[in-house]
Image (cartoon, grey):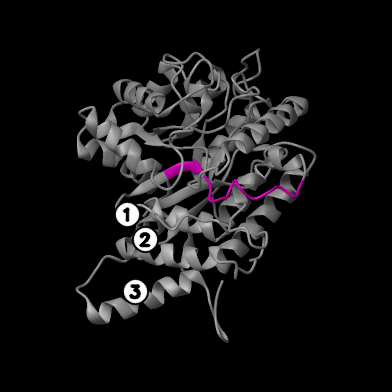
Amino acid sequence: MIKWRYLWVSPSALVNLMYKMDARNAPPMPRRTFLTSAAGIALAATASGCGESRPDTPRDAGRGANPQLPRPDLFVVNMLGGIRNPNIPRSGGPSQALQGERRTSLDERALADALASGTAAVNTTIGYVAGPRDPFESSVADIARWNRIIRTYPDALLKVWAAADIERAAREGRVGIIQGFQNAAMMGDDARRVGTFAGLGVKIIQLTYNVANQLGHGSMVPENGGLTDFGRDVVAELNATSTLVDLSHSGEQTCLDAIEVSTAPIAITHTGCRAVTDLPRNKTDRELRLVAEGGGIVGIYFMPFLAADGMAVADDVVRHVEHAVQVCGEEHVGIGTDGGTTAYDDMEAAYEAARRDVEQRQAAGIGAAGERAGVVPFIPDLQGPDQFRKLADMLLARGHTSERVERILGLNALRVMREVWGA
């Protein structure tokens, strides 16, 4: 918040006010372009030390933000990511690493970075992933918590119910929040719960995490069992409720079975290509090809699994994108970073945080091959609000057309979501 004498003005409200004032004395300017300079001014004020905490946000978390933000002239649909500031010290203990709560460390800096990145919408993980919480109750609570966050920032965030909301968010200079699950364990033994969550606005549901659940096997289960009868019932309910099926983290046979039984296009929102880097979190060419043949989409992540030694860099992202395009066709490849748009300020702290996370995940039995100390869960040279612009420039420099790059960054995902969810 910014304090001018006795008047309190939120950064998002300041964006609107400045935009209206500028319009009186200057030629028309797209609001999303104007947002860059306004967000930078808002962040500069926040960094001056007069910030106030928001609900679910640590006090003064936005200090030290960099007001130099890139021009947000991209249309990005991040199929798995978040809006968070990784520089905020955790207060929730080890369970945060297990529950995915690090993705919701949202402050003014994280918000401005997301707005500046060109992100029109992001599939934000909510609900149960792993750990001791009750899967159903904790998932309902997380939906309510994120609804409160969205209401807190109405000029910057928009809950996505249909594909048209993504386009609306882009027009209005907001970020669409797609609520999605990375584990379907909260279904218990009742596939009709899919309808309950669909009614609450959950638009994407991943069948399994790394381990097995009642639907099937995750990618770390050596037996590689397929989709269970209950898993087939859940897929049928997902199709019936126009909820996008996500096969990230699934074991190969579970993935193949789900592709076979789904009557709607499906997504692998965040993965890599196993033919490029042979790790179980990456998908085989057969899986990738069948997803594309069914009209779905494969999102390439910005994760260490893109390199055999875990030291993945931006060039590795390009290699996996290009292989996916070769296998799937340019209409069926997208981006699902599995990360945020705010960079780490202290890389030593990032490596230490990653070490703790790996230990906690291994102790909980949910880690993946390729996770180890000394490896951070992001691409070090592809961080910050300009990450999508940098990737686009790299692809263009390698001869990919602007139309293809636009498809990969967002238009392909929008097409699949429109087909599954409706307009």
Relative to 175, is 415 on the left or the right? left
How far from the left and from the top, in percent, is residue 313?
44, 26
Q: State if disc 2 and disc 1 touch (CB < 8 Å).
A: yes
Residue type (three-letter) at the residue carrying disc 1: Arg
How far from the left and from the top, in percent, is residue 84?
56, 50
Residue type (three-letter) at the residue carrying disc 2: Thr
In front of the other: 129 or 353: 353
Upstream in the sequence, badge 1 or badge 2?
Answer: 2
What secondary structure is found at the residue carrying circle 1?
loop
Q: Please report the residue visible at 53 percent of the width from the left and 30 percent of the height from the top.
A: 248
Cα distance, mark 3 to mark 1? 16 Å
Q: Quadrant of the N terminus?
A: bottom right
Q: Tell whether position 208 is magenta.
A: no
In front of the other: 245 or 318: 318
Q: Quadrant of residue 375?
A: top right
Instruction: Say the numbered circle drawn on residue 36.
Output: 2
Instruction: Say the numbered circle drawn on residue 252.
Output: none
Upstream in the sequence, badge 3 or badge 1?
Answer: 3
Instruction: Say the numbered circle drawn on residue 71.
Output: 1
